[in-house]
Image (cartoon, rainbow, N blue to C red):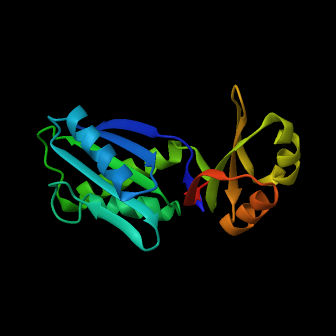
Amino acid sequence: MKVLAKATTYSTTIKKSKFLCFGYMVQTKDDVKNIINKLKKEYPDASHICYAYILNEKTFYFTDGGEPSGTAGKPIYGALQSFKLNYALLVVVRYFGGIKFGPGPLRSTFKNVAMQTLELSQLKDCVLADVIQINVPYDLAKKVTTIFNSSIINKQFKKEFVEIKLAGDKKIILSKLKILNLKPQTIKENQVV
């Protein structure tokens, strides 16, 4: 599965209209809602804010944001599909410059702006896994690191313990933790890692 490695921005002016495109990795509909609300506050005078997102093959959405039906959201969604992305949001903020495009050229413009943004983006391969955080006493840290070596995605040294994040199958990780007499601090299922 491919995702956006980091947030991306792209801007261009076509026929006096300014297009700002933003790409984000998102994991939930709430992530999408928060980003859209932030952009609406940041660009309150924009003529249109159009977007599309794909979380997975069953969860996706697109909107024309007030542009003529089918001219913005669907082409943006098509760009996400063509890059085979999951957990991705593309938002195009448009400032109308006074020259009407017509439905066909407008559709092509939104698709091109979205594609250009994705071409400039860093993509990475990811998987879905359960992420479990544990706090390990220093005297057990080496043993835990050896046992979970391939599952460790983050390790931070704190004053009294080592905070370790593990990614993988929850049942397998929990069974190994039980043997070590360690308890998880947090469990997040189906995370992009």
Classify residue 44 as left or right of residue 184.
Answer: left
Across and down, in percent, residue 82 comes to: 49, 63
Q: How many marks?
A: 0
The quarter of the image holding the N terminus is: bottom right
Q: Is residue 162 above or below residue 74?
A: above
Across and down, in percent, residue 121 comes to: 52, 44
Considering depth in this image, is 117 or 59 the residue closer to the camera? 59
Q: Residue at x 73, y 61 (%)?
A: 173
Q: Residue at x 34, y 53 (%)?
A: 30
Q: Residue at x 25, y 56 (%)?
A: 105
Across and down, in percent, residue 161 comes to: 72, 34
Residue 14 in sight here? no
The residue lying furthest to the front in this view is 181
The residue lying furthest to the top in this view is 159
Q: Residue at x 32, y 65 (%)?
A: 61
Q: Quadrant of residue 71?
A: bottom left
Considering depth in this image, is 64 or 146 the residue closer to the camera? 146
Q: Is residue 49 above or below residue 188?
A: above
Classify residue 155 as left or right of residue 190.
Answer: right
